[in-house]
Amino acid sequence: MDLKRIQKEVWQNKINKGFNTTDVNKEFCFLYGEVAEAYEAYRKKKDDLNEELADIAIYLMGLSEMLGFDLEDEILKKVSKNEKRVYKNINGINTRIEG
């Protein structure tokens, strides 16, 4: 999967369809709504949970483009950072102790 290309396609679709491309606050609200819809689909064992999760990814890509971030690069950097973190189970809670 080429996330960079998909992020550009998501953005172009927003432009083509007249969706929000300027209001960051509104976009965060839409993203929050999609997370809520995904949770409801999970909680109610609905068949469209996969689509709701895809909607979350699409909104993240659109928001990333709006803010000038390459989401693929940011994910790769974060995965690398997380791999280097060290955790210890303290009183039943996985607690980060390094990184």
Image (cartoon, rainbow, N blue to C red):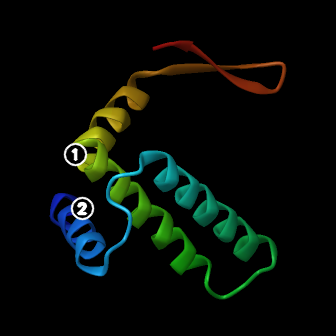
Up-down relation of residue 62 to residue 51 (above or below): above
Residue at x 25%, y 42% (from the top left corner): 69
Q: Earlier in the sequence, mark 1 or mark 2?
A: 2
Query: Considering the image in quadrants, where does the N terminus appear?
Result: bottom left
Residue 40 in the image: state x and y as whole percent. Answer: 75, 71
Residue at x 84%, y 19% (from the top left corner): 91
- Report the residue that reaches farthest toward the right: 91
Circle 1: residue type: Asp
Label 2: which secondary element: helix
Q: Quadrant of residue 15?
A: bottom left
- Report the residue that reaches farthest toward the top: 98
Residue that label 1 marks: 70
Give the distance between the C-alpha atoms of the residues marked 1 and 2, in whole angstroms.
8 Å
Circle 2: residue type: Gln
Residues tagged 1 and 2 counted as in contact (Cβ below 8 A):
yes
Residue 37 in the image: state x and y as whole percent. Answer: 67, 70
* In this picture, residue 48 sits left or right of residue 62: right
Residue 36 in the image: state x and y as whole percent. Answer: 69, 63
Residue at x 28%, y 34% (from the top left corner): 77
Q: Within 10 angstroms of label 1, few (less than 14), some, or many (20 or more) residues?
A: some
Mark sitting on residue 7: 2
* In this picture, residue 85 sits left or right of residue 75: right
Residue 89 in the image: state x and y as whole percent. Answer: 72, 22
Label 1: which secondary element: loop
